[in-house]
Amino acid sequence: MNLRDMLRGLLVRLYARRVEGHLDHAQVPKHIGVIMDGNRRWAKAAGSSTVHGHRAGAEKIEEFLGWCSETDVEVVTLWLLSTDNFDRPQDELGPLLGIIEDVVRTLATDGRWRVHHVGTPDLLPSPMQNALKEAEETTAHVDGIVVNVAIGYGGRQEIADAVRSMLLDAQDKGTSMDELAEAVDIDMIGRHLYTGDQPDPDLVIRTSGEQRLSGFMLWQTAHSEYYFCDVFWPAFRKVDFLRALRDYAARHRRYGG
């Protein structure tokens, strides 16, 4: 590292401390959703392989959760693999699944996070399903940030699964279709989502400069605030995180009013 890079790094750290010092912890979002985008483009810009980009993105996760633990964040949802990602070439998808499985096991053994899977388990290979089940079981007692790992996740699929779950639940209780139709409301559907017992995201962060949700938590983000960051996910820094929190704190949430 040359002197110029050292000075730039020092200035960034000093700026981050300044932003953090002015952060109102009373205005910190309780639930943050993260669309971790840009691994492949980061790798291409660095002249490296796609797999290296995914590994670098995976390594960023614990650092990010560490920043969250320094605030009052209670829930973090990390979108690790969408249902659309299964269309990627096998020579990319295979290593990516292995990297994500390693992430799940690392989070579970860390001891600071309570891991919860959001997604459709049946879409995932057996080793991944087993890793997710073990992670949820071994961290169920942890009194820390709830980390939702969105793997095999799609927003439309979640809503379809919620409706299916609601219908099966009604069937088990002997509820007629007429009775169910009369009882269905927003709260009932919400209880059958993957995150049914959790608060909706207050803030959604997407890296890489893309300004769309791409199907991320379509139901839960109806009143969320969005923060789009130009930085690729592997290069996402604490100062970028703090800027997102500062931007969120400055907004007046109207909830449609």
Image (tube, helix red, strand yellow):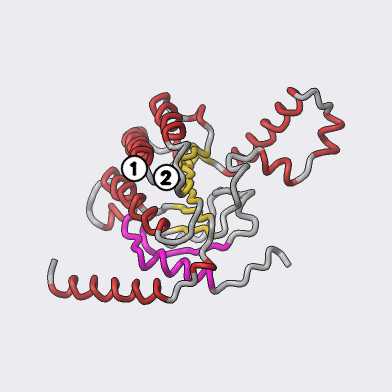
Tell me: residue 23, above or below residue 78.
Answer: below
Amino acid type assigned to the residue bearing label 1 in the image: Asp
Q: Is residue 122 above or below residue 156?
A: above
Label 1 sits on residue: 110
Instruction: Give the CA distance from mark 1 to mark 2.
Output: 7 Å
Where residue 212 sits: x, y (%)? Answer: 53, 57
199 relative to 106 in the view: left or right = right
Marks 1 & 2, CB-CB < 8 Å contact:
yes
Looking at the picture, tell me which residue is in the foreground, 243 or 89: 243
Residue 46 image position (x, y, % from top left) = 24, 56
Q: In this orientation, does residue 83 appear?
A: no
Question: Of the residues shown, which amino acid type is indicated by label 2?
Answer: Trp
Horizontally, residue 257 falls left or right of residue 26, namely right
Asked which secondary structure carries label 1, the reply is helix
Is the N terminus in the top left, top right, bottom left or bottom right quadrant?
Answer: bottom left
Outermost left residue: 2
Quarter where residue 222 is shown: bottom right
| Direction from residue 182 to residue 65 in the image, left or right | left
Identify whether 239 is placed above or below 182: below
Total residue callouts: 2
Q: Is residue 236 left or right of residue 200?
A: left
Q: Which region shows up in magenta? A: 225-249
Quarter of the image for the C terminus: give it: bottom right
Along the line of sight, which residue is nearer the eye, 195 or 209?
Answer: 195
| Mark 2 element type | strand
Q: Viewer-proximal residue, 183 or 140?
A: 140
Residue occupying image coordinates x 33% and y 34%: 98
Q: Which residue is denoted by mark 2 in the rendering?
A: 113
Residue 10: in magenta span: no
246 magenta-colored: yes
Number of other residues with Cα within 10 Å of mark 2, as a class: few under 14, some 14 to 19, many 20 or more: many
The prevailing secondary structure element of the residues shown in magenta is helix
